[in-house]
Amino acid sequence: MSLAARSQSPAGFDASPDIGAESTVESGLIAEDGVTRDVVAVARRVAESDVTVMLTGESGVGKEVFARFIHQHSSRRRHPFVALNCAAIPDTLLEATLFGHEKGAFTGAGDARAGKFEQAEGGTLLLDEVTEMPLGLQAKLLRVLQEREVERLGAAGGRRIDVRVIATSNRDLRKAVTDGVLREDLYYRLNVFPLHVPPLRDRRGDILPLARCLLRRHVGAGRVLPEPTQAAAERLAAHAWPGNVRELDNVMQRALVLQRGNVIGLDDIRLEDGAPAAPAAAGVSELGSALRVSESELILDALRAERGRKKAAAERLGISPRTLRYKLARLREMGFAVP
């Protein structure tokens, strides 16, 4: 699952759209939270160049969506966007899939076939989870990136290519190099412009808009789009989402099975343990607690409890300091007295 959505959705706990949010119609992603908007702004700048990009982030955060965003906003947008999941293809087939092969190159190669590099000519090639690629194949990939030339299996010579490469990984890249999972020379070749996609728990302003967009995606034709109740919305905002957007998508599909009428209630929100979602415990440890009147009160309570120490307040709320700074700025704009 990705950050992708097909239409604009409102942000936060109210139904009013955020005019400053990234347009999902234009970009294919949700960027209601300030943290996500910062990443989108950088991605848009990166798209204007032709540098190799390394997207990192936890599984399910939407790295492929950002890769598509970069392609769509680049000068290569009229050419192919080709994605290859390096973890999903057996090692024995990955080389032929990536580089292509000539007829008779190996048993079963009845026809010549272009590899992913050739298929992406003029456009963008996404190497998804590139750190899962075998080390021997990493060496061959490095050569292609250096020489800008690909050689099919069984071919007598190479072919020049014009392809932009974007790679993704859910690993700590430095640790992957240290552990011998990723070649250091390939690390430097791929990591020309690193871009990190934050986990969903660090961009909570995206949760409800994403939930609505996922609901819209799964609602059948002619069916009214159900709206989460206040309690359901607050429960969604309070969850840690270890599975990120993929987990949120699963929860929304369950909710559509269980809901009645035109609303999704708290009992329709079933998290990974399969039980109905209970209201969050009182206190400020979970942002958006269903027992609190509003997110604003939770933030202000946390600041008071931590005597204005923003880092400690962010930890208490379970969000990043950067997200807290953005939300405090929004509270000041709304006229709240922020300690």
Image (spheres, helix red, strand yellow):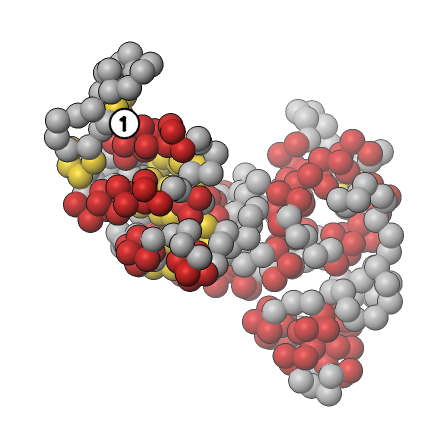
110 or 8: nearer the eye?
110
* Point 61% across, 55% down: residue: 200
In the rendered structure, the answer to whether residue 11 lies left or right of residue 129 reads right
On screen, residue 121 versus residue 261, left or right, reads left
Instruction: Answer few, some or many: residues within 10 Å of disc 1's Cα (few below 14, many 20 plus, some between 14 and 19).
Output: many
Closer to us: 111 or 260: 111
Asked whether 112 or 194 is in front, the reply is 112
Residue 76: tell me if it is visible. Answer: no
Res 16 → quadrant? bottom right
Furthest-left residue in view?
A: 157
- The image shows a total of numbered marks equal to 1
In the rendered view, tell whether residue 219 sits above or below residue 288.
above
Task: State which quarter of the image contains the N terminus.
Answer: top right
Q: Secondary structure at mark 1?
A: strand
Q: Is residue 129 above or below residue 57?
A: above
Residue 6, position as x, y percentages in the image: 54, 39
Instruction: From the top left corner, tell me how far across and down residue 82 is, in percent.
Output: 36, 35
Residue ranking furthest to the top = 110
Would residue 189 appear left or right of 263 to someone viewing this image?
left
Residue drawn at x 45%, y 61% is 175
Query: Relative to residue 180, is residue 299 depicted above or below?
Result: below
In this rendering, does residue 42 appear at all? yes
Q: Position of residue 30 (x, y in %)?
A: 55, 50
Q: Given the image, on which type of amino acid does mark 1 rest?
A: Gly
Location of the C terminus by quadrant is bottom right
What residue is rendered at 32% in x and 42% in y?
Answer: 136
Which one is in front, 178 or 240? 178
Residue that carries the numbered disc 1 in the rendered image: 100
Residue at x-position 64% and y-position 48%: 243
Q: Quadrant of residue 11?
A: bottom right
Residue 245 location in percent, x, y?
61, 46
